[in-house]
Amino acid sequence: ELLKKDFVILDGAMGTMLQKSGMEIGEIPELLGITNPDMLIDIHKAYINAGAQAIYANTFGANRHKLNGHSVNEVISAAIKNGKSAAAGTDCLVALDIGPIGQLLEPTGKLSFEEAYDIFKEQVIAGKDADLIVIETMTDLYEIKAALLAAKENSSLPVICTMTFEENMRTFTGCGISSMALTLEGLGADAIGINCSLGPRELYPVVKELCGLTSLPVVIKPNAGLPDPLTNLYDVTPHEFAEHMLEFLELGVKIFGGCCGTTPEFIKELSDILKGKKPHERKF
């Protein structure tokens, strides 16, 4: 139903907002949903008020390898509950957010495909109360394949998949755009796209190629430009971010959001600038 709208607005960075809200260095971000739920609810509400139609629950690293013994089900259930509380009384959807496991799969690493599948399956089942599933910031095609299969075989929720690409048009592990598009569409993803790594200007050629390779809705969730190595501040303002995102309209992109460095101000500018506009017809 959401895809029937001209555009779908996703939220911005969770990590950036947690840091701004006082998260301590070394804290496990996902545990804040249990220890400080009000912080998470406030962040979600800020994005909803800025125009987000779907928010990502604070579950990016909520897998058995990253939670140091804490229950995956407990952490994910709390995160979804926080998202639902923030979205109460609105039409905003809450997504189970699944990021990389944090260990490399064979043959590069020691994690087997079967074990990766089982880790993702545990997250998917724990997130059963979400409205959709987002698998994001992936660099390994083998790993995102395990995650997507786990989602499709253990849930009936729609699944968005996004990978992160460098300016050389490949992911950190060498996955090309065509391999990503063909594999994820073939495995039943409901929408695919690009998130993180670069700003909107740098990601334009990546997304342009992707749009010519898939019939699925395409997602773009860039960083707020590039970080300054000295200050760690990103170099694109909310207004500049929104202006750059307009360039994706000609490609037929209709699902927009922000990643590292973006805040509710970025999503507000993005939401405002898209009002009254229409996505171009996709050609692929």
Image (cartoon, rainbow, N blue to C red):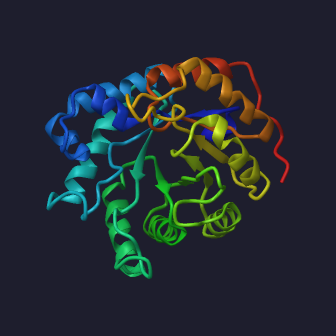
Residue at the image point whose x is 80% and y is 35% from the top: 250
Residue at the image point whose x is 29% and y is 32% from the top: 18
Q: Is residue 273 visible?
A: yes
Residue 33 location in percent, x, y?
22, 40
Q: Hey, which quadrant is residue 109 in on the image?
A: bottom left
Tell whether 81 sits left or right of 156.
left
- Pick the front one: 70 or 236: 236
- Pick the front one: 101 or 203: 203
Residue at the image point whose x is 67% and y is 60% from the top: 177
Residue 154 location in percent, x, y?
42, 68
Tell whether 39 sits left or right of 149.
left
Q: From this view, report whether residue 81 is shown above or below residue 192.
A: above
Q: From this view, report whether residue 150 is shown above or below residue 167.
A: below
Residue 53 location in percent, x, y?
52, 32
Quarter of the rendering occupied by the C terminus: bottom right
Q: Is residue 271 visible?
A: no
Q: Hey, which quadrant is residue 85 in on the image?
A: top left
Q: From this view, report whether residue 260 is shown above or below residue 120.
A: above
Q: Across the whole image, how many numbered discs are drawn on residues? A: 0
Tell whether 275 sits left or right of 149.
right
- Pick the front one: 256 or 171: 171
Residue 158 location in percent, x, y?
54, 54
Quarter of the rendering occupied by the N terminus: top right
- Pick the front one: 275 or 105: 105
